[in-house]
Image: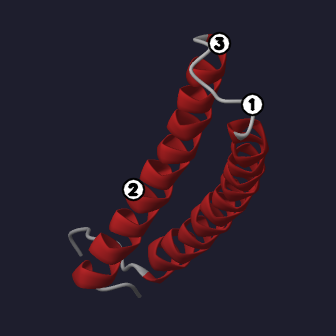
Amino acid sequence: MLGYEEKLERIELVDAVSDVGRLARGLDQLLESLAHADQLDPLDVGGILALRSISERCAERIGDAARILEAQSEVLYAEERANAKPCGNQ
């Protein structure tokens, strides 16, 4: 059974994964914005492509991590519910 502290840590971890996902998407939007505003030197294009590739890989890994955490949470909470004793008058 998960303790209160463990539940909070798990929630914070899921939130952190979400934040990192937003960061990766924000980076991609910023790179696109710079490219469309003609603020890039032709030499920057290679760096931009490398950053976009890194951003895409990070987003994929973040998505995988989020799915794993969600699946683990579902299993843990199901076990917790199954082990909980009913609170009824006897």
The CA distance from mark 3 to mark 1 is 13 Å
Q: Which residue is mark 2?
A: 15
In the image, residue 9 sits, relative to residue 51, either above or below, namely below
Q: Residue at x 61, y 73 (%)?
A: 72
Q: Nearer the viewer, residue 47 or 72?
A: 47
Q: Which residue is mark 1?
A: 42
At numbered mark 2, what does the secondary structure look like: helix, strand or loop? helix
Q: Residue at x 65, y 12 (%)?
A: 36
Name the residue type under label 2. Asp
Left or right: 87 in relation to 38: left
In the image, residue 88 sits, relative to residue 4, either above or below, namely above
Name the residue type under label 1. Pro
Left or right: 13 in relation to 6: right
At numbered mark 1, what does the secondary structure look like: helix, strand or loop? loop
In the picture, the quarter occupied by the N terminus is bottom left
Name the residue type under label 3. His
Q: Position of residue 59 (x, y in %)?
A: 67, 51
> Of marks 2 and 3, which one's residue comes earlier in the chain?
2
Kindly indicate whether the residue at mark 1 contacts the one at mark 3 (C-beta within 8 angstroms). no
In the image, residue 89 sits, relative to residue 30, either above or below, namely below
Q: Which residue is mark 3?
A: 36
Q: Quadrant of residue 68?
A: bottom right
* Callout 3 crowding tier (Cα within 10 Å): few <14, some 14–19, many ≥20: few
Q: Looking at the image, is mark 3 or mark 1 nearer the viewer?
A: 1
In the image, residue 7 sits, relative to residue 60, either above or below, namely below
Left or right: 37 in relation to 43: left
What count of labels does the image hold? 3
The CA distance from mark 1 to mark 2 is 37 Å
> Of marks 3 and 1, which one's residue comes earlier in the chain?
3
At numbered mark 3, what does the secondary structure look like: helix, strand or loop? helix
Q: Quadrant of residue 64?
A: bottom right
